[in-house]
Amino acid sequence: MTIKPRSARALLDARSKLHAIAAAAHATSAAETGRAANAVADRNRALDESFIEASASLASARSVHDLDRAAITVAASRGDLVDATQIHAEAAARSDATMSTLKVRSRQLRVAERILETVTRELDDRESRGEQRRNDDMAARRR
């Protein structure tokens, strides 16, 4: 069974579009991962600042309530850091998934390109052989 060149080109076009979609999805998820990493760094700095603030409030604490406020400040900053870290982990997992999808789409695109090259080469060979036969027939008739 032969593959028609039009079908091979249509396959290549479809695979190219799927590859472009996968590349865009991966670029988006990579950007989200970068933003999530920046958020983790920001939350980490905020935690460091809350430690500094807590140490200052502990130094000037006059009651148990002052100690509780310092603990609440640090706990809130830790909670924000944990949330940001979880969001970053989820974004990294999505980025890995889109990367694997992009690899699959790239492989499929290369296969479609090879199919089109093979079909085109076979069509050219067939046309060349037909042209050679016609030339041979015309040369044989002249004799």
Image: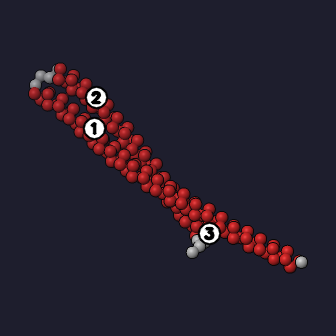
Q: If you read the primary sequence from the N terminus, does the residue marked by circle 3 or circle 1 appear first?
A: 3
**Residue at 17% across, 23% down:** 58
Q: Amino acid at mark 3?
A: Pro
On the picture, is 71 further left or further right than 44?
left
Q: How is the image coloured?
A: secondary structure
Q: Height in image: 5 above or below 105?
A: below
Q: Quadrant of residue 76?
A: top left
On the picture, is 97 further left or further right than 54?
right
Q: Quadrant of residue 70?
A: top left
On the picture, is 23 further left or further right than 76?
right
Disc 1 is placed on an element classified as helix
* Furthest residue toward left: 64
On the picture, is 97 further left or further right than 23?
left
Judging depth in this view, the residue of 104 and 70 nearest the camera is 104
How far, Cα to Cα, is label 3 from label 1? 56 Å
Mark 2, residues whose alpha carbon is within 10 Å: few (<14), some, or many (≥20)?
some
Q: Name the mark nearer the viewer: 3 or 2.
A: 3
Report which residue position mark 3 lands on. Answer: 5
How far across and down, in percent of the image, does residue 106 sit? Answer: 50, 55
The answer to whether one can see residue 46 in this image is: yes
Q: Height in image: 100 above or below 141?
A: above
Q: Are marks 3 and 2 in contact (CB under 8 Å)?
A: no
Report which residue position mark 2 lands on. Answer: 48
Q: Amino acid at mark 2?
A: Asp
Q: If you read the primary sequence from the N terminus, does the residue marked by circle 3 or circle 2 appear first?
A: 3
Report which residue position mark 1 lands on. Answer: 81
Q: Amino acid at mark 1?
A: Leu
- Quadrant location of the N terminus in the rendered image: bottom right
How far across and down, in percent of the image, does residue 115 sit? Answer: 57, 64
Mark 1, residues whose alpha carbon is within 10 Å: few (<14), some, or many (≥20)?
many
**Residue at 10% across, 25% down:** 63
On residue 37, the disc is none
